[in-house]
Image (tube, grey):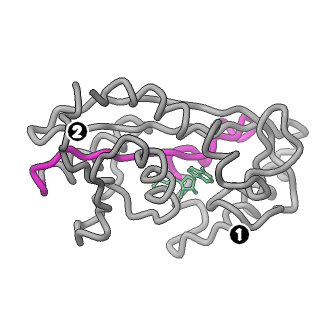
Amino acid sequence: MKLPRGATLIVASHNAGKVREIMQMLAPFGIETKGAGQLGLPEPEETGATFVENAALKARAAALATNCYALADDSGLAVEALDGAPGIYSARWGGEERDFAAAMTRVERELKDKGADNTRAKFVCVLALCDPSGTVDAFQGEVHGHLEFPPRGKNGFGYDPIFVAEGETRTYGELEPDEKHRTNHRARAFEKFKRSLS
Ligand code: IMP
């Protein structure tokens, strides 16, 4: 699928951190973007069993509600010793309040409870592009690394303060936004999505 020149693209996310990152990545392409929150669109329930299913259902809900192209992101942290948890439940891991300090503490506690020395983890991002008729294309990116506790750094969002990418010593919370956005899971998914921009 190709995104037609001049089309408005709805960024189908209510997560301000993600909307910011996605809009920054789209900025050089001169695409008019609007956030789903800004348009007052409801947030669909994430009933899918995979990142791809959840990204697709969010993109499709926004595309059908607006009759525009929509781009959604479903992403999360997958911790190897926790069998991929929190995975698709990353946003909900800190409870209804989406308290990421609590979510990071929970990851640390579950690793301790398992007696796991293995702190390997990856961030996964699936970007789903949906056209106004409901057809979806999905693009996946991953970045591998490990976790460090206690959390460090004030940049970014979510689990950034505990994630250290391969080859780095600083957490994502300590990286400047530009450094993180150049190489992270969302950037890698975006590299694939870019082929849809004509
Ligand atoms: P969802 O895709 O809206 O279900 O939520 C994904 C969740 O994964 C976010 O709320 C964050 O907790 C986490 N996450 C995804 N991408 C990142 C990232 O780049 N940094 C930190 N946490 C992330």
Relative horizontal placement of residue 13, taking residue 21 as reference (left or right): left
The image quadrant of residue 29 is top left
Q: Which mark is residue 101?
A: 1
Q: Position of residue 157 (x, y in %)?
A: 62, 61
Residue at point 32%, 62% (across, down) = 35
Percent position of residue 120, x then y: 79, 35
Q: Nearer the viewer, mark 1 or mark 2?
A: 2
Identify which residue, 1 or 105, lies in the foreground: 1
| Image height of 104 relative to 169, above or below | below
Q: Secondary structure at mark 2?
A: strand
Q: Mark 2 packing: few (<14 Cα in 10 Å), some, or many (20+)?
A: many
- Measure the C-alpha gap from mark 1 to mark 2: 33 Å
Q: Earlier in the sequence, mark 1 or mark 2?
A: 1
The quadrant where residue 115 appears: top right
Three-letter amino acid code of the residue under disc 2: Cys
Q: Residue at x 56, y 46 (%)?
A: 76
Q: Which residues are magenta?
A: 65-89
- The residue at which mark 2 appears reads as 130
Q: Is residue 44 left or right of residue 22?
A: left
Q: Residue at 80% of width from left, 32% of height from top?
A: 166
Q: To which quarter of the image does residue 144 belong?
A: top right
Which residue is the extreme one toward the bottom?
Answer: 97
Q: Amino acid at mark 1?
A: Ala
